[in-house]
Image (cartoon, rainbow, N blue to C red):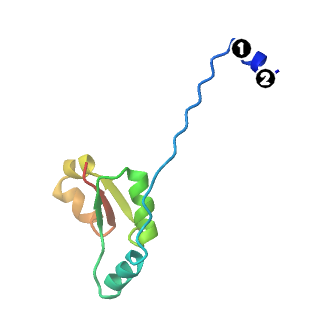
Amino acid sequence: MMLQLFHNTQLLVMLAWPVQDPVRKEVPDAVAVCKRAGIFVRMVTGDNVHTASHIARECGIMMEGGLALEGPTFRKMTEEELIPILPKLQVRFWL
């Protein structure tokens, strides 16, 4: 019965399955140690903006109010534009 239903129909199934390496278990603790020592941890990556922000949150790098910038946007900014946002810049994309 099912074969007759799809006999004259083309069926296309597309599946996207995101793959992400897990964050190493020692990374969030290492980030926390750095922060307690007064080090402002930033992440520079070539990952997709959404993936990188998610990983940075998992590691404790990206916090509420933090900023992520893609490389082209960062490179186009003038020094006057960059100075006020640097304290909030937590993730920069290398692309």
* Residue pictured at 17% horizontal, 58% vertical: 79
Front residue of 80 and 95: 95
Considering the numbered disc 1 on the image, is that residue within a helix, a strand or a loop?
Answer: loop
Let me know if residue 66 appears in the view.
yes
Count of picture labels:
2
Considering the numbered disc 2 on the image, is that residue within a helix, a strand or a loop?
Answer: helix
As displayed, is residue 3 above or below residue 33? Answer: above
Instruction: Give the percent coordinates (x, y) of residue 40.
Output: 29, 76
Give residue 93's mark.
Answer: none
Residue 3 left/right relative to 38: right
Mark 2 burial class by Cα count in 10 Å: few <14, some 14-19, many 20+? few
Image quarter of residue 57: bottom left
Let me know if residue 65 appears in the view.
no
Front residue of 86 and 43: 43
Q: Amino acid at mark 1?
A: His
Instruction: Give the percent coordinates (x, y) of residue 68.
Output: 35, 58
* Residue pictured at 27% horizontal, 64% vertical: 84
Q: Which residue is mark 1?
A: 7
- Reading the chain from its start, which is encountered first: label 2 or label 1? 2
Give residue 2's mark.
Answer: 2
